[in-house]
Amino acid sequence: PVAKPMPQVSTSEEAPVVKLNQKEYGVEVAVLQDYGSVIRYVRNLERRFEQKVYIILEQTPQQKNYHVIMGAYPSRRAAYQLRSHLLDFQIRGSVTALAYAKSR
């Protein structure tokens, strides 16, 4: 597959904010705490697959968790198809509504 061009990603703690469509579904493939590791993981995913990859920040007073979510599909069925495809590459994930991921 041909990789899509990489969006510019800041190496600081700030990255562009994207408004997610609340009626779409994706596959959560990781929850990481180190921002540098998140960026490396996302770049690797974007090189290997032609999918949108979102980083959703969940912040508590004690720590930051970065949820990595692939895809943005109008139905759960389509997201489950991506999940099955990812299993072929030993990438496990769970289907989630982007609205749920956004509101965490």
Image (spheres, rainbow, N blue to C red):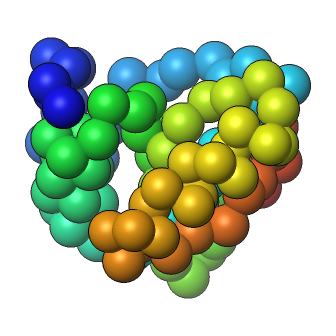
Q: Quadrant of the N terminus?
A: top left
Q: Residue at x 39, y 68 (%)?
A: 88
Residue 55, placed above or below residue 84: above
Q: Residue at x 57, y 69 (%)?
A: 93
In the image, taking residue 80 as reference, residue 89 lies left or right, namely left
Q: Quadrant of the C terminus?
A: bottom right
**Residue 63 percent across, percent down from the top left:** 50, 77
Q: Residue at x 36, y 77 (%)?
A: 90
**Residue 82 percent across, percent down from the top left:** 56, 48
Give the number of callouts.
0
- Front one among 93 and 100: 93
**Residue 20 falls in which quadrant of the image?**
top right
Q: Residue furthest bottom?
A: 62
Residue 63 visible within the image: yes
Q: Residue at x 20, y 20 (%)?
A: 4
- Front one among 81 and 33: 81
In the image, taking residue 12 as reference, residue 101 lies left or right, namely right
**Residue 33 falls in which quadrant of the image?**
bottom left
**Residue 23 percent across, percent down from the top left:** 86, 25
- Front one among 22 and 86: 86
Residue 102 visible within the image: no
**Residue 102 percent across, percent down from the top left:** 73, 41
- Front one among 69 and 86: 86
